[in-house]
Amino acid sequence: MDKSIVKQYRAHLELAGGSVTPMAIICDLTCESLEVVKERVNTLLNGKAKFEGAQSTVGSPGLTLIFHPNFNRGETVLGWISPYEVPEHMTAEATIERLKEAAA
């Protein structure tokens, strides 16, 4: 089995419910490309998402915070994007391929 390690990016968004939409929305996205993850987050938030690097903390290098001007004037963190390393055979893409093969 291939034991290559690859970098992935995980975005986690939490949008609290309100009077219009009473339920909270929690969304996780995973991809090999930071730019693709940002693009998808921006699409989910109907554009204008703002990404800011977080202050370096122990165990969280490369953390990016997600904001949007429609949520508390862009001052509330809606989520984050974090890099992580994973064995290539355990990436989201590899898992999806195995599921497709099993379903065929």
Image (cartoon, rainbow, N blue to C red):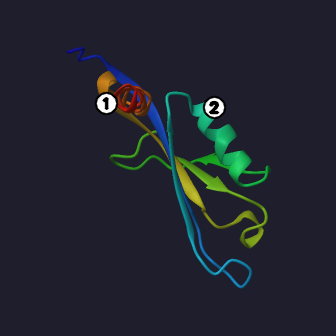
**Would you say residue 19 is visible in this rendering?**
yes
Q: Position of residue 31 (x, y in %)?
A: 51, 33
**Would you say residue 63 is visible in this rendering?**
no
Taking the spot 66% from the left edge, 42% from the top edge, the residue there is: 40
Q: Which residue is mark 1?
A: 90
State the residue in front, 38 or 23. 23
Taking the spot 73% from the left edge, 72% from the top edge, the residue there is: 72
Earlier residue among tags 2 and 1: 2
Label for residue 35?
2
Nearest to the eye among marks 2 and 1: give it: 1
Rendered view: 32 above or below 67: above
* Callout 2 secondary element: helix
Where is the C terminus found, in terms of image quarters? top left
Q: Residues within 10 Å of mark 1 (few under 14, many from 20)?
A: few
Q: Amino acid at mark 1?
A: Met
Q: Residues within 10 Å of mark 2 (few under 14, many from 20)?
A: few
Residue 45 position by quadrant: bottom right
Identity of the residue furthest to the front in this view: 104
Rendered view: 56 above or below 104: below
Q: Position of residue 32 (x, y in %)?
A: 50, 28
